[in-house]
Amino acid sequence: MTDNTGLSHFPPSTRSARRGDSTARKQRILDLLLETGNATIDALAAHFAVSRMTIHRDANALAQQGLVEKLHGGLALRNRTATQKTVSYRTTRAREGKRAIITRAISLIRPEQILVLDDSTTVAEMLPLLPALAPLTIITNAMGVIQALAPYPDLRLICLGGDYNRPRNAFFGLICEQAAQGLHANTMFLSTSVVHDGTAFQNNPDIIKIKRILMEICDQTVLLVDSSKFRKGGLYRLAGLDAFDHVLTDAQIPPALHDRLKTEGISLEVCQTDG
Amino acid sequence: MTDNTGLSHFPPSTRSARRGDSTARKQRILDLLLETGNATIDALAAHFAVSRMTIHRDANALAQQGLVEKLHGGLALRNRTATQKTVSYRTTRAREGKRAIITRAISLIRPEQILVLDDSTTVAEMLPLLPALAPLTIITNAMGVIQALAPYPDLRLICLGGDYNRPRNAFFGLICEQAAQGLHANTMFLSTSVVHDGTAFQNNPDIIKIKRILMEICDQTVLLVDSSKFRKGGLYRLAGLDAFDHVLTDAQIPPALHDRLKTEGISLEVCQTDG
DNA sequence: GTTATATATAACAAGTATAGTGTTATATAT
DNA sequence: ATATATAACACTATACTTGTTATATATAAC
């Protein structure tokens, strides 16, 4: 039976397919949806210069995984609280000041110690420096800490379990709190969203609870707050700055604020970038 | 440039290749070696009716995995027990059987349920299929489960914390056990190293403890054991097979063993590959 | 409520990349 | 000197991806 479909009349190039394109395009569709929230099948087909059917197939695959929702004529991101937004945004905020703080924080650590690390981006920047100080025991409720330190056999890792919180990539809740209560540690390194009026604030009550418990079970607490954190805002009170054994910040802190906190007896330490 | 190699003078069938043949033949080479201990390249080439070169390539791949040793003119099994244990060996061996088991296991899940997943490789193969069944709540002590399911917002993830065990990429110990004791779930899916004498065995006492606790807090337990698990070995007794509500295996289970277990009242289910 | 239009699915065909294999030529080991 | 191992190339079959058409289904219009 010879060609009677008419397909062969079309130029071959329109039917070409490079292997592996499909997954790359699906990823880019997700990227687009992360910005726009939703898109029509036609628009995507035009954007990628492929047929509607191809987008349909991509959409079906993504819907199968539960990542997007197929609507009539288009598709929408299923849940916008994806990790991308919060994490990447906060990460790129005040990096250079943080480095000085990290350096000072690391200097407080001695081998064989038991450390508690919270799920903040500031503390996350300490992680690459920890294997050099092994052996250490690390207690944390942050997935990222476990993942980052898992390769190093001289670090003992203890994870506080609990309900997985996607935007923070960490565990919270009753399980987390009970696990923490049964432990003891030497030093806790933590950060907080906002500091003002001599008080550390946070926006999420679950985070407050676990941080308070962890502070209690530690001999010593070290608060890492780059100067951008000294501003208004923050819904829930975590603790007064006098509750911390060390409060590390960077040179950008306003001198007036610095002096006032010092006269109030806060263990404030301004970390300078060396070199 | 026209044909000057002489290749085209040979009938095309001698150069045919069916995709996927290679891994099957490698498996059969291992099977042969498990009986004979060693074999010459020529003998293997004759046995499979392929060229020496093809056997060379197979042998190189197997040697790369450390399963066999290439000698001049032949190849020998490198370590009899190690080969039998090697993950990749077992993986390729019972893959299609596992798929049938996975499919059946998935069919036991209903949306809104609370599941417990252990840290076995068998259960790991279920993970990609879970987002489609959302919403679900997943309880686990396995890092891989959390990592694999983290992107899907309709899955609630609860991690049992504890001491991080690198080789298993999971959490164990007191914290893990205490966290588990405070929970309740609908269905637990678990696997085990070895099954014989109507009993499931494991090699690590920490694993036994957490698995027993998790079994207790679940309404229903489903044991996934592909037929390669029915063999001697296993140091610690986990539980009799009668303790599980479902015992799923594949069609390769010896009929005699199957009949005996059924007469003993075990809820044994042989999963067939559909299609 | 019925019709018209847009969108979704199913089925088929076609192109491309890849894995698998054999042959020859060259290198290495026995 | 001979047997065996590797490298390089050619070729095939298959799986993957895509486009087109035909059919079914859903939304919109009246």
Image: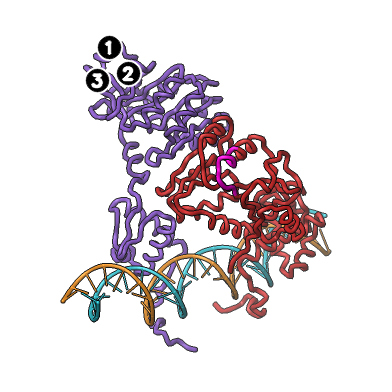
Chain colours: A purple, B red, C cyan, D orange
Horizontally, residue A250 falls left or right of residue B103, namely left
What segment is highlighted magenta in the picture? Answer: B213-221
Query: Which residue is rendered at x = 70% and y = 60% of the image?
Result: B252
Where is B50 relative to B37, above or below?
below
Amino acid type, label 2: Leu
Q: Report the residue marked by disc 2.
A: A241
Horizontally, residue A107 falls left or right of residue A263, namely right
Where is B82 relative to B162, above or below?
below
Query: Which residue is rendered at x = 66% and y = 80% of the image?
Result: B11
Q: Position of residue A23 (x, y in %)?
A: 43, 59
Query: Which residue is rendered at x = 60% and y = 57% of the image?
Result: B101
Residue B268's label in the rendered image is none
Q: Quadrant of the C terminus of chain A?
A: top left
| Chain under disc 3 | A
Q: Report the residue marked by disc 3.
A: A197
Residue B39 seen from this side: yes
Residue C22 found in image quarter: bottom right
Q: Residue furthest bottom?
A: A1
**Whether labels 2 and 3 share one chain:** yes
Q: Report the residue marked by disc 1.
A: A264
Query: Which residue is rendered at x = 77% and y = 68% of the image?
Result: B46
User: Are discs 2 and 1 less than 8 Å apart at CB?
Assistant: yes
Query: How many angstroms separate mark 2 from mark 3 (CA)?
Result: 9 Å
Which is nearer the eye, B150 or A208?
A208
Amino acid type, label 3: Asp
Horizontally, residue A44 falls left or right of residue B194, namely left
Q: Position of residue A77 (x, y in %)?
A: 34, 54
Residue B30 found in image quarter: bottom right
- Of label 2 and label 1, which has the lower sequence position? 2
Label 2 CA crowd tier, 10 Å (few <14, some 14–19, many 20+) = many
Q: Secondary structure at mark 2?
A: helix
Is residue A219 covered in magenta? no
